[in-house]
Image (cartoon, helix red, strand yellow):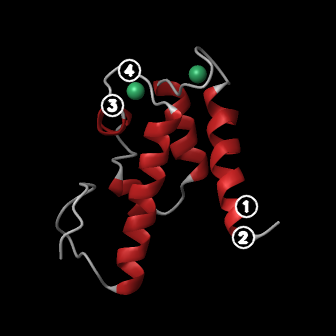
Amino acid sequence: MARLEQVITNIVDIFLQYADDDGKKHQLNKEELKKVLEKEIQSPELKNQISADDIGEAMEMLDKNHDGEVNFREFCRCVSVLAKCYYNKKTGKGGKRGKGKEEDED
Ligand SMILES: [Ca+2]
Ligand SMILES: [Ca+2]
């Protein structure tokens, strides 16, 4: 499979694997979110981006529609925040400001 296709299928597969584990299907509750962040993200730098050490805080940040769970759309936003963090690190852009916020101005 092409690399980008692998990324896409991985994102969907990872989400569904954890989201369908318990409670509502296709929704990550707090426990499920905790497992994803524990098992699928290792780098402390990335964990910090989404406050992964404090599951309540991470949930609050990711749960944009405030229904107490993380749906696929919210999960994608999370992946995109992490990708941006890695991109900024690699290109030396961004710096410390704008923690997880969606600012694109330079
Ligand atoms: Ca669930
Ligand atoms: Ca939600």
- Determine the CA span between mark 1 and mark 4: 29 Å
Amino acid type at mark 4: Gly
Q: Earlier in the sequence, mark 1 or mark 4?
A: 1
Q: Residue 96 vs residue 8: left or right?
A: left
* Residue 1 higher or lower than 40, as above or below: below
Q: Secondary structure at mark 2?
A: helix
Q: Residue at x 18, y 70 (%)?
A: 105
Instruction: Estimate the x, y position of residue 46 in percent, counting from the top left.
Output: 42, 60
The residue wearing badge 4 is 68
The residue wearing badge 2 is 3
- Determine the CA span between mark 1 and mark 3: 30 Å
Q: Secondary structure at mark 3?
A: helix
- Determine the CA span between mark 2 and mark 4: 33 Å
- Determine the CA span between mark 1 and mark 2: 5 Å
Instruction: Estimate the x, y position of residue 14 in percent, counting from the top left.
Output: 66, 43
The quarter of the image that holds ligand 1 is top right
Q: Which mark is residue 6?
A: 1
Q: Residue furthest right?
A: 1
Q: Residue 19 vs residue 106: left or right?
A: right
Q: Residues within 10 Å of mark 1 (few under 14, many from 20)?
A: few
Depth check, mark 2 against mark 3: the one in front is 2
Q: Residues within 10 Å of mark 3 (few under 14, many from 20)?
A: few
Disc 4 residue: CB within 8 Å of ligand 2:
yes
Is there a contact, CB below 8 Å, between mark 2 and mark 3?
no
